[in-house]
Image (cartoon, rainbow, N blue to C red):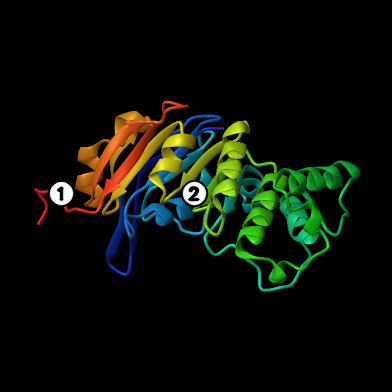
Amino acid sequence: MDLHLDAVTVTLDGRRLVHDLCLTVGRGETVGLVGPNGSGKSTALRCVYRALRPTRGVVRVGGADLATLALRDSARTVAALTQDGGTDLDFTVAEVVALGRAPHLRGNRALSPRERELCAAAMARLGVDHLADRGVLGLSGGERQRVLVARALVQEPELLVLDEPTNHLDVRHQIELLSLLRGTEVTVLVVLHDLNLAAATCDRIGVLAHGALVAVGTPWEVLTPELIRDVFGVAATVVAHPLTGDPQLLYSLRTPPDLP
């Protein structure tokens, strides 16, 4: 299912956080949003998973205005992993993962055998099946993050929205998670801070600065030394990864000569 943000603008308390954002994510595509802190990345994502309603503009999923869908219907279509997506209740890992089926259940219906198998498979894919009976409050940040991704996958969404999903993960689990997401047929919109991870795992990258989209395209088209200098204020050399050919950034601590 495709996603289209059509001139999305968000203004809160008189401050414009996102301005005329136009972005399309094609069916089955993985698109990353990058940009400095405060550039509007998380605000844009909140409009997609309906934590915010745009001040102006429309979010369309599969051609339908997301705001016109019943909440249950949109929850069956869009799954989100947010930066504050934890829980204050000490459910077991298995119980948290099973919550991903909530949009598909009516009343107190128990999970079907297929749904139980779906939960078990998701936990195994994320490497948390051995934690099934553990309380989530006793897990490390990385373990809890993988549990929440498993919950999102169990939801069987057509669109997956993730805000910094690699937070708390070690390098191995960062790579495994992003490779897993790209290997699914789900449409993915993901916010990442690590530009090298974005280059290695995203089909296209959108760059936000001061709430506006300043560039969008393939990693090679977008991640240029000039853009890195202008948007992030650092000097970078772009090289091809020797195995994959993906662009990789080598940063310099010196200030670019044309910056104050």
Residue depicted at x 26% and y 54%: 210
Q: How many marks?
A: 2
User: Relative to 247, is 174 on the left or the right?
Assistant: right
Which label sits on residue 48?
2
Q: Residue furthest front?
A: 242
Q: Is residue 167 visible?
A: yes
Instruction: Label 1, secondary structure: give it.
Output: loop
Q: Nearer the viewer, residue 182 or 216?
A: 182
User: Relative to 27, is 213 on the left or the right?
Assistant: left
User: Relative to 134, is 67 on the left or the right?
Assistant: left
Q: Where's the N terminus, which quadrant?
A: top right
The answer to which image quadrant residue 43 occupies is bottom left
Residue depicted at x 74% and y 45%: 122
Q: Position of residue 165 (x, y in %)?
A: 54, 52
Please tell me which of labels 1 and 2 falls first in the chain.
Answer: 2
Q: Position of residue 220 (x, y in %)?
A: 33, 29
Q: Nearer the viewer, residue 98 or 168?
A: 168
The answer to which image quadrant residue 148 occupies is bottom right
Mark 1, residue position = 256
Residue depicted at x 29% and y 47%: 251
Looking at the rendered structure, the kind of residue marked 1 is Pro
Q: Position of residue 235 (x, y in %)?
A: 22, 46
Looking at the rendered structure, the kind of residue marked 2 is Val
CB contact under 8 Å: marks 1 and 2:
no
Circle 1 packing at 10 Å, graded few (<14), some (14-19), many (20+), is some
Of circles 1 and 2, which is in front? 1
Circle 2 packing at 10 Å, graded few (<14), some (14-19), many (20+), is many
Q: Where's the C terminus, which quadrant?
A: bottom left
Instruction: Label 2, secondary structure: give it.
Output: helix
Q: In the rendered image of this protein, does residue 138 appear above or below residue 224? A: below
Q: Is residue 3 visible?
A: no
Q: Label 1 vs label 2: CA separation?
A: 36 Å
